[in-house]
Image (cartoon, rainbow, N blue to C red):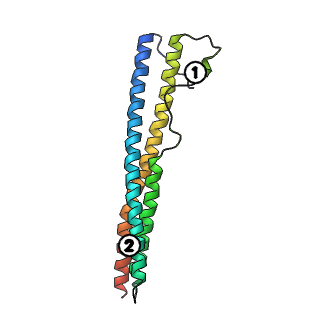
Amino acid sequence: MTEFEWPPSVQINEAREIVRLGELQMEDIRELAISGDSRAGTISAALSAVAAGLVAAAVAVLQLKQPNIASIAALLCSATFFATAAGFALGAAFPSDFGIRGFDPAKLIGLDVNEFQIVKWNAEALVETIAHNTEKLRQASDRFRLAYFLSAGAIAVPALILAAASCFS
């Protein structure tokens, strides 16, 4: 645990208030993580369904007497982008190593500590956990953002394939 320099004027009630405010922030971070998980899971399922539909469409085009290879390539390219985006969205849904508030009381056994020291240690643990969880949320947000960019690529790249193919036919 990181040692912080507490002003000598901080009293037990002020330290308890610091812990209470830190716990409120941890609760807000938890709510953000839960809602982010929900959004990312929903988007991942939708993107997976679109990818599967595009693969089915490519198979259907392949069954035609004279299948258009550019259309099949565009459909499969788009499906690949959507499936990859679904993977990133799913990765954003479950941030790993997410910290919880509090600390292990076993660390206090055998120590001569008072309530004020315990409250200060709790506050210090909250500072570290909040910073850690905020970073995990940022990483999940980056993965989610990448899923959106890949979804845009799933539309743009196949359109370029079809445009290029039309130039040569």
Q: Looking at the rendering, which quadrant does residue 33 occupy? A: top left
**Distance between mark 1 and mark 2 Cα atoms:** 57 Å
Between residues 147 and 4, which one lies in front from this camera angle? 147
Q: Is residue 146 above or below residue 24?
A: below
Q: Position of residue 56 (x, y in %)?
A: 41, 73
Which residue is located at x 42 percent, y 67 percent? 52
Left or right: 42 in relation to 2: left
For label 2, the residue is 158
Mark 2: which amino acid? Pro
How many dots with numbers? 2
Q: Tell me the number on the disc at residue 105.
A: 1
Mark 1, mark 2: which one is toward the viewer?
1
Q: Quadrant of the N terminus?
A: top right
Left or right: 102 in relation to 30: right
Dot 2, crowdedness within 10 Å: few (<14), some or many (≥20)? Answer: many
Mark 1: which amino acid? Pro
Left or right: 5 in relation to 30: right
Which residue is located at x 34 percent, y 83 percent? 166
Q: Earlier in the sequence, mark 1 or mark 2?
A: 1
